Amino acid sequence: RNSEFRVFETQYQDSVDKVSEAINLSINNKLNTAMTFSAMYTSRFRTQEQWPNVTLPDFGYQAKGQLEVARGIALSFNPIITNTTRDGWEAYATESAYTIIGEEMLTNRSCDTCRVVEDGIFRKTDGVAIDDPGYSTESRYPRHMVPVWQIYPIEQNWKAVMFNLHSEINRQRALDDMLQYKVPTITGLLHLVQHVEMDPSSILFYPVFNHFHESRFFQEVVGSISIVFTWADILRSVLPGYIKGLIVVLEKSVAGGANSQSFTYRICGEQAALLGEGDLHDPRFDSYEHQVIANVAQDAQDLGIVDYLVTYRIRIYPSLTFQNQYLTVRPLAMTLTVVAMFVLTCAIFLLYDYLVDARQNKVVKFAQRSGRIVDSLFPSGVRERLFSHAEHLRNEILTDDNNTCPGSGGDNISSIPSKKNPAHHIKQFLKGSFHKSAAEHEKNEGCMKNSPPIADLFHNTTIMFADIVTFTEWSSKHSPEDVFYLLETLFLEFDKVAERLGVFKLGTIGDCYVAVVGVPDARKDHAVVLAKFAEECRCKTNRILSELIDELGPSVGKLSMRFGLHSGSVTAGVLRGLKSRFELFGDTINTASRMESTGAPNMIQVSEETATILKNEGFESWLRPREDLVYAKGKGFLQTYWLEINKDNSSFDNQLDDRKLSFVHKLYSGSLGMDDEIENDNSNRICTKNHNRSDFEQGNGDSILINTESQAAMSRCGSSSSSVFVDPSER
């Protein structure tokens, strides 16, 4: 119990400190804001003999931020007018009303009883606006008038413009003190007309001087800055939300003890509610009383006795509600309950965290695997368009209230970005989960018909086909593990080079590696890049085949690769449906395949189109024309070139003889036949069809030795392997 009391007292003292600090800070902010605006007027007009006929430009814009800092509801400039200056000032005000914000409301009469600026200074008697007579009998300055001139916000307060603040008794006493002692003053508690219910408010008046001086006694007060505020706004947003039931009694006192007023507030968290007029605190908590004095007359010690100087005494008390937050009858039981709930919550959280983490790891691993698969199948731009298409299909399947397609209205669904997790799309795509029933399949088919295909035409591309010579015979004599070990080892090295050079791997067709540059991203140097890629792959092939002899046997050393390159335009896109694939179509594909199939082992053969591009790029030294013309189905006889990037200028290179290659080519043509040499599959990817070896094997049974071209090519790569033997029956 004693511990609870200590907590209660500590929390109460902490709350008192927060409220006291907030009250003093708010009063100081209001004083500083008013002082700033007073100095702005003095600074701008001190050298001009035109007081009180002054208007601050852009008043509303400057007052907006200052009023928020002061946490007030209105800020205004009010000049001091006497009967001597009244006529001139009213004429000035009528003329100047057109230049200030809200001029339409100030110059255009909206009703018969509404006043405008040209009607002059007014006061209110029994709630009715009348022309001010220019005399206030109860004032120490009876012939002074203090009309509102510039005010913010004007939209809610335009009716107050030209109202004589000095005509109302509460404002009059504060203004008299300001005029007499030249200090800021504050009014008593007011009930403003804009408040339907009582919300105790006050007005801070700050003097505006005609010039700057160290002593106020050598200055003349020519106007005032007024800030209207409510006391509830000062008490709001002071305490944290868990503090409830703090009682604040606001008491106004006037020098001499006359006209005292008091109101009681209850603060609960950030809210301050008015309980009513008078001191309504619980007497049981009198011993906890704490007082705060709010007095805006900062120089009161120099003033002597001030007749009506208003000060506020704020008394703070706890309440039973506040006390009951800390004094409980079963603290131990509550503590144990909280501890038990905490332990249970921690256990549940740990279990949940474990399950979520395990599932997340599975999802991440699957997403990484799926991402790598899709990355290898589709270019990045195509993937985004494919995901958008798949997302629309998925949304359509999940929608049961209509049978229309998202793209039926002509929208390009491939251009809409997907915000879902890409791994989700990949999973659905690879598993074909968009086609779960015949009805859904029909709906998907209809949606595909109503949406544009995912396809583009690429004008400047270079295609490479690379095929392992005698691979079919070799693979038939080795285990599936050895076959795939060879292909994976070799093609993995190709993939690394492709990633480094920016080459797009279209895929593999058996032992044929197909790559392209210029798809999906256009490149001016497509032929140069793919030529470098082919040369590097050729060198890596020789090195890897030599290294694999120890693992796969000496027969692997007889393998080699043919490379063929051709440049031209292709159509690329995704054939949507079950097991969609990224495909390339066009005559360029066929010609590139023929460049490979009519080439020589360990050599790179390029078409005349590719050679022309390389020459234009300044790489004519890479090319050596092939002496014989190459026959290609559907093309006739073509002039091709050997690509030789890494020449070593040795005498051995000069011994290369194309006549042997011409002889081999003729043997190929004779044995394979021109009609069935090359076969197109449905996607225009070319593979060699005829593997008949009888015409060669029935001779003397010997293989043809291609020793000059292949040996020279291997020499350029620095390969240490022996001469490459090519069985002429292979392709």
Image (cartoon, rainbow, N blue to C red):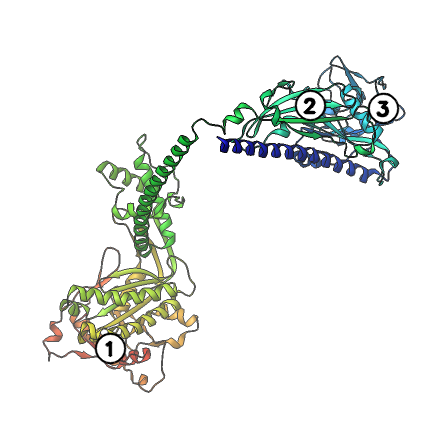
Task: State which mark lies toward you, 3 or 2.
Answer: 2
Nearer-N-terminus badge (1/3): 3
Left or right: 97, with 499 as reference point: right
Which label sits on residue 662?
1
Q: Is residue 210 left or right of residue 505?
A: right
**634 or 315: nearer the eye?**
315
Q: Is residue 597 above or below residue 115?
A: below
Q: Which residue is mark 3?
A: 144
The residue under the point 83% across, 28% down is 179
With respect to residue 506, does 724 lie above or below?
Answer: below
Q: Amino acid at mark 1?
A: Ser
- Viewer-nearest of labels 2 and 1? 2
Q: What percent of the width, then of the height, locates residue 701?
A: 11, 78
Mark 1 and mark 3: span between their CA atoms?
Answer: 120 Å
Q: Could you classify mark 1 by the number of other residues whose Cα lies within 10 Å: few (under 14), some (14-19), or many (20 or more)?
A: some
Q: Which secondary structure, mark 2?
A: strand
- Identity of the residue furthest to the front in this view: 2
Q: Can residue 171 be seen at all in this image of the molecule?
A: yes
Which residue lies most toward the bottom here? 651
Q: Please name the amino acid that badge 3 sits on.
A: His
Point out residue 280 in the picture as x, y percentages from the top left corner.
61, 19
Q: Quadrant of residue 404?
A: top left
Residue 635 at least partly seen? no
The mark tally for this picture is 3
In the image, residue 13 sits, relative to residue 138, either above or below, namely below
Q: SS of the residue at dot 1?
A: helix
Report the residue at 72% width, 31% height from top. Answer: 101
Q: Amino acid at mark 2?
A: Glu
Residue indicated by mark 2: 251
What separation in Å lies between label 2 and label 1 (alpha carbons)? 115 Å
- What's the distance in space between the residues labelled 3 and 2, CA to CA? 30 Å
Mark 2 in CB contact with mark 1 (< 8 angstroms): no
